[in-house]
Amino acid sequence: MILTILFSLLIQGFTEDFQTLKQGDKISKDFAVKYLNAHPDHYEEYFVYETYMKPKFVSCDLSTLIYTENSGTCRKEILVIFDQNGKILSKLVISSNCDHDMSIPTYKSWEFQLNLYSSEVVLDISSESVKDKSKIDGNGHIIGDKDFMDLETIKTNLLEVYKISKDGKIIKQ
């Protein structure tokens, strides 16, 4: 009986916390630490968390949240699948757009398309790499006075498809 009451309060607490989230709002430190595993000392100093789109209850047992993690130099959208207790079942970075260190010979970014009705996520991954590998040192940096913008590059695009299973796992197809 006591375990049933505690379990019910736990579910109710997550449900109430989850329902307070609105699209575009900053996510509270309490929610970010408790449910997103954010480090309490880094919450506002290094990262800002906000909801990207309206949180959604997919079923009685599963909820989805897409939130933005912004460090100032890197912005990522992250899809999280929660169980009814607020435990993270799976997590996927579905968009990434970061400042590029021009001494690094590759740059990768990606955007997403999401269809929660079909439980499908499609990532469009763009990558650009320095073509001449002789311009890269053993530590993976560009040699000499040149930087990424000065050298010839190869661009590629790749689509990755993921499905959200009924038990809340994100599975690459």
Image: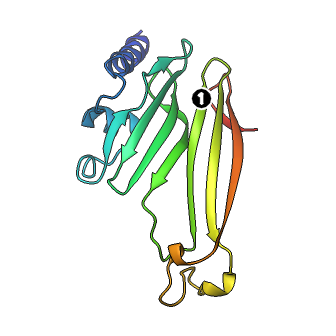
Give the percent coordinates (x, y) of residue 40.
27, 46
Residue closer to the observer: 156 or 37:
156
Element assignment for label 1: strand
Q: Residue furthest top?
A: 1
Give the percent coordinates (x, y) of residue 151.
58, 77
Q: Quadrant of the C terminus?
A: top right
Q: Amino acid at mark 1?
A: Leu
Q: Residues within 10 Å of mark 1 (few under 14, many from 20)?
A: some
Q: Is residue 2 above or below residue 110?
A: above
Q: Quadrant of the N terminus?
A: top left
Residue placed under numbered mark 1 in the picture: 114
Residue closer to the observer: 101 or 152:
152
Task: Report the residue at 62% width, 63% height from top.
Answer: 128
Would you say 160 lies left or right of 58 here?
right
Question: Looking at the image, can residue 91 be seen?
Answer: yes
Name the quadrant containing residue 23. Answer: top left
